[in-house]
Amino acid sequence: GAVVSQHPSWVICKSGTSVKIECRSLDFQATTMFWYRQFPKQSLMLMATSNEGSKATYEQGVEKDKFLINHASLTLSTLTVTSAHPEDSSFYICSARGPYPGFTYEQYFGPGTRLTVT
Amino acid sequence: GQNIDQPTEMTATEGAIVQINCTYQTSGFNGLFWYQQHAGEAPTFLSYNVLDGLEEKGRFSSFLSRSKGYSYLLLKELQMKDSASYLCAVLDSNYQLIWGAGTKLIIKP
């Protein structure tokens, strides 16, 4: 149980275009979803936290107009990288957390999306 | 501020035992997680400690001392596939996960 999928697993796009990444909890209701970015050989960097039906909370330094997050349902969150540039190339990982009680505060991770902007 | 410290890199020999330490200073404490992350992949859950003591799960064990702000992950009978980064993360008073930078573990034959 507690499976999270992410789509696409990898994407290559041209500079200036937008890319949407989907994160789905397959067998549980994800009341909270998290979006991380990870550059090569570096640790996870939390970008934003989103609760179903409300606006995402962005970490300091993360541009909310550039990284649009939507958490419209209890099983789906999307991250849209708008007007992507080569410096946005990274490994983007989502995670989801179920409702408490019943679930621990463990975050279940999706497999990640590798974005390359040319 | 909130701070989690763990060694950047460790090297161990196949078949041996290795202990990865994690010290933390956070605003509140609601548990500590250990995750394993292979290169190019997402993290996978290893353990969760909220009470003091040792939790054993197969070859992996995790220890917590809340009074010392300290945890360790113990890996026994090391295998080559254990080569990965090991991430320590603390759930703070707001139930937010604070992540350490990770320890890269290199296993040599």
Image (cartoon, grey):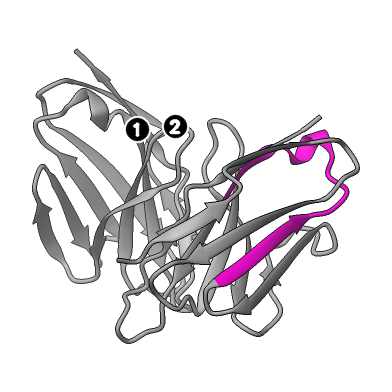
Residue B26 is labelled as: none
Please provide percent x and percent y for residue B19.
20, 38
Please provide percent x and percent y for residue B109.
19, 12
Asked if A115 appears above or below B56 in the picture, the reply is above
Crowding at mark 1 (Cα within 10 Å: few <14, some 14-19, many 20+): some
Q: Is residue B108 magenta?
A: no
C-alpha gap between disc 2 and disc 1: 7 Å
Quick one: SS at disc 2? loop
| A55 on left or right of B101 | right
Residue B39 is labelled as: 2
Please provide percent x and percent y for residue A102.
29, 83
Asked if B63 appears above or below A97 in the picture, the reply is above
Q: Residue at x 11, y 25 (%)?
A: B16
| B64 on left or right of A81 | left
Asked if B41 appears above or below A82 in the picture, the reply is above
Quick one: SS at disc 1? strand
Q: Quadrant of the N terminus of chain A?
A: bottom left
- Give the residue number, with chain letter if any, for mark 1: B84
Nearer to the camera, A74 or B1: A74
Q: Residue at x 87, y 37 (%)?
A: A15
Q: Residue at x 11, y 58 (%)?
A: B54
Chain ID of residue with mark 1:
B
Asked if B45 appears above or below A54 in the picture, the reply is above
Residue B1 visible (yes or no): no
Please provide percent x and percent y for residue A22.
62, 59
